[in-house]
Each structure stands twice: as structure tokens, then as C-alpha cells.
Amino acid sequence: MNSDDAAGIAAQVRDGALSARTAVERSLARIEVTDARINAFSARLNERALKRAELIDVHPQRHKMPLAGVPFAVKNLFDVAGLPTLAGSKIERDAAPARRDAVLVRRLEAHGAVLVGALHMDEYAYGFSTENTHYGPTRNPHDTTRISGGSSGGSAAAVAAGQVPLSLGSDTNGSIRVPSSLCGVFGLKPTFGRLPRVGSYPFVASLDHLGPFARSAHDLALAYDSMQGPLHGPPSDDPACAQRPGQPTLQLLDQGAQGLRIGVLGGWFREMALPEATDAVDTVAQALGTTRLIELPEVERARAAAFLITCGEGGALHLEDLKKRAADFDPMTRDRFLANALMPAAWVIQAQRVRHWFARRVARVFENVDVLLAPATPCVAPIIGTEWLQIGERRLPSRASMGLLTQPISCIGLPVVAVPLWGMSAAQPHLPIGVQLIAAPWREDHALRVAAQLQAQGLCSAPVARGL
Amino acid sequence: MDHSAYIDAAAATLGLKIAAEHRPGVLQFFALAAHMAELVQGLALEPHDESGNVFQPVPPHGADAT
């Protein structure tokens, strides 16, 4: 625990060594000083945050609050009362302001956290770079000439820049794990259906997940445990949300990787990665004492399935706006959304069938292993504006390729913790790259335990970017 | 494969106008999706290999609150 991470701030606020107001003022000041260079925030909630902090400071239960006084921010697809939910778009500026906060915002605040703002993202979450034309690119705090990753780029950048110790994002095809990797922070994409999505702007209902970013595995677990639990309203508000009780993870972290069977994913997950990515996985595997290589069947088809489901659902969702005001879409997404609106039903339905086939095969693999390792991105953060990525003989579109290694995993809803390593790129040693710790459904605890051990060993860390 | 005819017909059916400046991007992306479709269509599935999507009936308000 550090004095400036979520657990550290909360401990100080609980015992009175630090006021929640001071914790929030420090966060707001850091945002004020750094955000002109990063462009993570789309809205700052100074007045609301300071009022909320003052309530925490006089709250009779403050000494019991696990997130007492912890400033946090959310991707701007989360509803925030009084703000239009932009989802990275220009179009939604015309939407009515949200009447209440998203469920996960309410849950974090109920545990003492304080919302300080909303964060930039790719338009409608359809991208891996947060080079948003409407609002400008969100820059990588560790090298501001480079992308932050996406679509939750603001969420990762805000944590990496030390603006907040905790943020929330969403992950449909990799949008938590990709920016975690490129910005060098810890990210958790829980099991599909684990956290309720009520009050968040959808992208692909079949694939959308919500989850936290932080600077430690401990903080991820702290936030995740605070957000777990079934919906308290009608289940039909989020039909995908599993009506299962929370399974706390924080107290399990000290167990580390002990007793867990760990394997390294081969095939697609090594072929579609540059040496800096495979070296990161090998470094983690060595630290965990595993040489076991595991190949999943038909990974490329699973990735294609996620791609097509995204096309079909994303295109249909925006059809009316595409008809009425296509010119108002971000040029980075527009042509793709237009094409998506035309997807033949047979392609999308077959993709859903392949998805389920793949999930059943991978479930068999998890009968003999607990955690699988894979790179989170094929490479470190590219320069803003990069169009192409060369992987071996393949010349691939750079932005879409950032999700090559995450997409097959979120396709079947497995929980993943992305952990950051440093110095893996000989050419760019100042840049981080992430490794996915992938567990069986509902076993977030396994991935978090391994992440905690790797951090305790000093192999993974999320330092605040210097020189901002 | 040229998808132009399909794109024109599907767009007209949906009432979706594709401006000339967007057409090259739409064609390019649709071709990529078609490649993905070849991949998923290429996996041999049995009739009972259904999608995992399950519709959940919605009871009257109040009856399903938890």
C-alpha cells in the first residue's frame, strides 16, 4: 500500500490522518496541472466532489468505509447525474442529462469513494486508441506522442498520470486491457455478467463488460469487491447480469499463486505479438515457475466471432442516427458503423454459435489449469496517428490490431487482470506492456491473486508518469 | 468478391444513405467483415450447436425484484 493509492488514501481518511476533502483537492489540483497535456477528462465535477468529500469527513461510518475519500473518475459512457452521457460522441451532447448516477458509481460512492470527473474514450467505445476526432486524442502519460489505447483511454491515462488512483471503464473487445497495457496500469475485466451495467451507454450488449483500473492489484480487488453483487432492481434492467452473490477477493490476495495451475497460451497469442509482448509473458511465466504451453482451439475464428457480433449489434444500435446524421459521427468510426448496419443476420447468428462452441471447448481446458497467460497487446503504445503494424510477414491496421489478443478472450467472457511490465521493448524501454492473467468464469480471485504476487515480487508495477 | 450490389440493396432496404465519400470505407470494412464471416462459417457445427444467448422472460414489475 502506498500513501497515494486507493488503499493508502482510504486508510488515512479512515483514521483521520487525512481528510477526504484534502484527498479530493489533491486530485483536482493534479488534474488541473496535468490534463492539458493528457486530455483524459471530458468533465470535472469539482463542486460535487468537494461537497461529497465534506460529507465523508463527517460521516459517522467513515472509519468503516473501504474507499473513504478515494477520488475516482469514470469513462464518459457511465451516467453521471446532471451530465449528458456522451459515450465519446458529438451526437449525445444533445441527450438529456442523466437523472442519476450509474449503479457502479453509486456502489463506489456508497463505500466512501468520491467521483471527480468523466473521462474521454473512443466514440461509442468503437476503437482501441482514443484518438477521438471530436475531443482530441487522449495522450499516453508515459510518452505524450503516443496513444493511450482504448476505448477506455481516458480511464487508463488518468490513473497513469496520477490524476486519480482509481477509475472505471468498459471492455467489449479489449477496451480495459488494451489501455491498461499501453498506459502501464492494472486493469480488471470481470466475468461477463458479473457487474451490473445499469446506467452505462451500451455498445454490444452481448459482449459489454465494466471494470476498474488502478495502480495495484490490491486496489483493483478493493474496488471490485465494492462493486460486486446482483442488481437490486428488476433483473430485466440488465438481463446479462448474473444474479449471484458477491465473492470477495481482497482477503484472498495473500495466497498469491500458491496452488494455482498456470499455463502460457501459444499459437495465435504468440504469432500475433511482437517480441516485447512475448518477452513480457515469458518473464511472468518464469517468475511463476511455469513452462506449460497451452493452445486453445480455433482462436482466430473466435476472434472473428467477436468481430461480427460487434458489427451486428453495434450497427443496429446506431442505425437511426446513421440514417439521420451520419455526418455527426467521428470519421474514425463512421464508415465502420455504416458497414456494420448492413451485416447479414446469418453472419452474426453463426458468430454467436461459434462463440458458444468456443466457450465450451475452453471450459474443458480450465478443468486442468487455473490461470492462462497471454500478451494484452501485440506491442507497446504506437505513436499517435500510426496506421500500420508489422507483425512478422503481416502488415496489419494498427488500431484494430491492438485488440487481436484480447478479443478472443472477452468473446467468451472470461475474467482477466492486465498487469504492466516495463523495459520489455529494447527500442522503447520507457514504455510498459501488459500481460493478461486469464481465469475461468467467476474466478476473478485466481487472476487477482497472481497479479498480487507478481506485484509483490516487483515484476509488475504502475508508477505515476514523471515529468507531466 | 465485390459486395457493392449487396451493400446498395441492403442500404436501400434499410433506408440508409451512404454518401459517396463514405462508400470506399464502407466497402473496405464490409470486405473485412466478409473475411471474418468466412472464418465463422468455416467451422463445422451441428444443428444442436446453438448460440449461448438465452432469452429471459420478464415477469410483471415487482414480482422479480431482488
Image (cartoon, coloured by chain):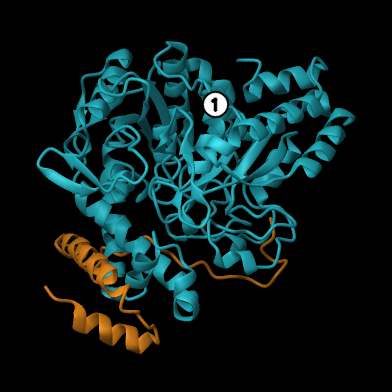
Q: Which residue lies at the image location 29% right of the left edge and 23% below the top edge?
A: A280
Across and down, in percent, residue A427 comes to: 26, 23
Across and down, in percent, residue A313 comes to: 41, 67
Quadrant in which the C terminus of chain A is drawn = top right
Q: Is residue A467 visible?
A: yes
Category of crowding for the residue at label 1, using alpha-carbon neighbours closer than 10 angstroms: few (below 14), some (14–19), many (at least 20) = some
Per the rendering, the colour in which chain B appears is: orange
Quadrant in which residue B7 is drawn: bottom left
Above or below, A110 relative to A217: below
Quadrant in which residue A306 is drawn: bottom left
Q: Please give the letter of the chain rendered in cyan.
A: A
In the image, taking residue B19 as reference, residue A165 lies left or right, namely right
Q: Which residue lies at the image location 32% right of the left edge and 71% below the top edge?
A: A339
Quadrant in which residue A51 is drawn: top right
Q: Which residue lies at the image location 61% right of the left edge and 62% below the top edge?
A: A237
Using the image, name the chain to which the residue with label 1 belongs.
Answer: A
Q: Which residue lies at the image location 16% right of the left edge and 64% below the top edge?
A: B38
Q: Which residue is mark 1?
A: A468
Q: Nearer the viewer, residue B40 or A366?
A: B40
Q: Amino acid at mark 1?
A: Leu
Q: Nearer the viewer, residue A461 or A146?
A: A146
SS at badge 1: loop
In the image, taking residue A229 as reference, residue A286 lies left or right, namely left
Spot the residue most to the top: A457
Quadrant in which the N terminus of chain A is drawn = top right
Across and down, in percent, residue A278 comes to: 23, 27
Across and down, in percent, residue A121 comes to: 50, 49
In the image, taking residue A60 as reference, residue B28 lies left or right, namely left
Above or below, A277 relative to A271: above
Q: Nearer the viewer, residue A128 or A104?
A: A128
